[in-house]
Image (tube, grey):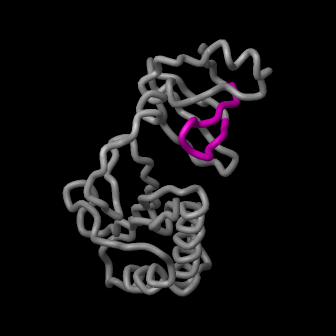
C-alpha cells in the first residue's frame, strides 16, 4: 500500500486514527485528532476513507502480523505489564516554561495547578487511548510537584516508579496504566 503525507490512516491493532505527517522508509508518523504524534511501521497501518473493495486488494494473507494473531499464542507467565519494543510511551514535560509561553503574572500556586491539570489530562488521555506507559518529567526542585503528582496518581488504576535515571535523571516518574482488555 502506498502511503503519502496527508493520507488518513488507522492502526491495525489499536483504536488510533489520524493523518500521516512524515514518512521515513518503513516508519510512518501519524498525528491523531488530539494532536498526539505516533510512530508506526507501514505494515501496522491501513489507509481509510477508501472503498472496502480497494482496501481488500492490499490485504496480505501471508502478513506475519496476521499469522501471529491466527496462531494460538503459547501461554506465558502472566504479568501485569508486557514490555514491547513498539510500545507507545507518552512523555510529558511538566516544567512551567514548556507548558505556557510565559509565567509572568503567575504565582507558585497557579503554576502548580497548571502542572497538575496537565498531568491529569495526559493521564486520562492515556487511559482512554489505552496507552500503557506515561513518563511525567517534573524535575527535582523541592519535591512539591512530585508529592502532588504521587497523590494524584493514587486516585487512578496505575502503578508508578522513578523513571530511568540514565534517560531522565532524578526528576521523572514512570507511570504504568492498568488496562482492561
Name the one closer to the observer, 61 or 8: 61
Could you tell whether 55 is left or right of 176 in the image? right
- The part of the image, by quadrant, that contains residue 81 is bottom left
Image location of residue 10, percent across then percent down: 64, 35
Could you tell whether 118 is left or right of 175 in the image? right
Whether 125 is among the magenta residues is no
Where are the magenta residues, as a range? 6-18
- The part of the image, by quadrant, that contains residue 172 is bottom left
Image location of residue 1, percent across then percent down: 59, 15
So how many labels did they put on this image? 0
Which residue occupies 42% across, 52% down? 89
Which residue occupies 30% across, 44% down? 74
- The part of the image, by quadrant, that contains residue 91 is bottom left
Tell me: residue 84, above or below residue 26.
below
Could you tell whether 148 is left or right of 34 in the image? left
Image location of residue 105, percent across then percent down: 62, 78
Which residue occupies 46% across, 55% down? 90
Amino acid at each position: 500500500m502506498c502511503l503519502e503525507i496527508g493520507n488518513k490512516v488507522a492502526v491495525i491493532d489499536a483504536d488510533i486514527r489520524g493523518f500521516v505527517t512524515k514518512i521515513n522508509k518503513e516508519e510512518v508518523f501519524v498525528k491523531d485528532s488530539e494532536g498526539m504524534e505516533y510512530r508506526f511501521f507501514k505494515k501496522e497501518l491501513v489507509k481509510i476513507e477508501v472503498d472496502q473493495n480497494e482496501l481488500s486488494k492490499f490485504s496480505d494473507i501471508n502478513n506475519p502480523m496476521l499469522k501471529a494473531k491466527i496462531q494460538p499464542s503459547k501461554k506465558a507467565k502472566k504479568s501485569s505489564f508486557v514490555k514491547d519494543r513498539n510500545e507507545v510511551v507518552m512523555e510529558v514535560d511538566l516544567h512551567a516554561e514548556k507548558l505556557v509561553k510565559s509565567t509572568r503574572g503567575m504565582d507558585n500556586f497557579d503554576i502548580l495547578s497548571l502542572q497538575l491539570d496537565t498531568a491529569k489530562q495526559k493521564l486520562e488521555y492515556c487511559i482512554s487511548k489505552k496507552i500503557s506507559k506515561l513518563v511525567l518529567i517534573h524535575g527535582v526542585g523541592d519535591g512539591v510537584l512530585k508529592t502532588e503528582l504521587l497523590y494524584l496518581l493514587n486516585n487512578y488504576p496505575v502503578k508508578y516508579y522513578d523513571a530511568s535515571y540514565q534517560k531522565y535523571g532524578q526528576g521523572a516518574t514512570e507511570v504504568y496504566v492498568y488496562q482492561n482488555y
